Amino acid sequence: MNVTAYAPASIGNVSLGFDILGAALEPVSGDALGDTVSAREAECFSLTVSGPFASKLPGNVDDNIVRHCYDYFINALRDKGVSARPCALHLSKNLPIGSGLGSSASSIVAAFVALNHFYATPFDDNTLLTMMGALEGQISGSVHYDNVAPCFLGGLSLMTGQSSPVAVSLPVIKQWYWVVCYSGISVSTSAAREILPTQYNIQDTLAFGRQLAVFVDALHRGDASQAAAMMNDVIAEPHRKALLPYFDESRVYCMQQGALSFGISGSGPTVFAVTDNQHSAETMLTWLKQHYIQNDHGFGHVCRLREQGASVQNNE
């Protein structure tokens, strides 16, 4: 048996939903934007790695998060009283580390989806999502689902704060284009968290809750204008933008070009703009590639939200 799973890039926070809102991405060009993990039968476990960002991963595969996913999954099988034959895994690392595109989440989700299919789907989606959150927490230092949930489930995900369901899917504004641009520099999630205040004033707290509530309501009513008006980050962006060269200039340009919203994807440095016009989206992307990208590692895409989430590409 040979199973290959694909897990897309994602936007954490989506500006207004710090740690509790996330979106899965799919370039309109048809290009893949995510990691893949393959599992095949083998006499003993092994992990190999390839892809444009493989060199940025730990040199020892025992330190690779995909190896940790395998160990976690096998232990969970044993807890169910199920003995598992070993398998060989291969990670194609296509997302840059510390990019704000859910790179670690993509590897984790692809690994668990591949393993679950390889071992005849012993775990349901909510259990898998809980596992994914636990592994993501090993990297970021705290369990949060705003990348793994949309990466796994697709579309726009809202975290419930409960064990079941961990996340619920929200309606998607289908006419929106999401312009994403990775500058090429790296921002660690832990460093981006350290820059945030430990306490917030009552005005920002009320604004956060109000915006999220109105945004969810607007999505369910299909009110794209009001939903876009709520996409303002009062929690992280005022502090994190100092880590991102040319952030303010990029926001000004994109808003002048008709962007409905502009913000930081996850912890950054990737930024995103939302628009309902594809020509404007392409214009923004061209400018961002010229001005926001800092080195040869940077890239950008015009995307839609990927409603499918993670997928099994082949199962033989």
Image: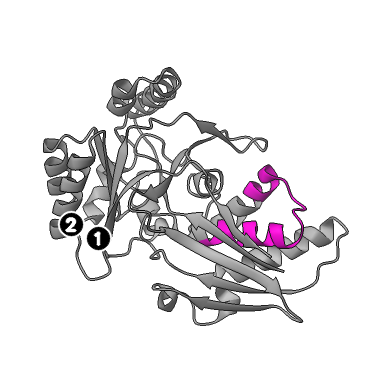
Residue positioned 65% across, 69% down in the render: 39
Q: Main secondary structure of the magenta part?
A: helix
Work out whether residue 52 or residue 143 is closer to the camera in this orientation and state it. Answer: 52
Structural crowding at the residue carrying mark 1, measured as other residues with C-alpha within 10 Å and reported as few (<14), some (14–19) or many (≥20): many
Query: Which amino acid, mark 2?
Result: Tyr
Label 1: element kind: loop
Q: Is residue 105 visible?
A: no
Q: Which residue is mark 2?
A: 292
Residue picked out by circle 1: 183
- The foreground one among 223 and 270 is 223
Tell me where residue 85 sits by quadrant: bottom right
Residue bounds of the magenta highlight? 107-130
- 38 is higher (above) or lower (below) than 179: below
Looking at the image, residue 120 sits to the left or right of residue 281; the answer is right
Numbered disc 2: secondary structure: loop
Residue density around tag 2, few if under 14, some if 14–19, many if 20 or more, within 10 Å: many
- Give the position of the N terminus as an image quadrant: bottom right
Residue 56 versus residue 181 in the image, above or below: below
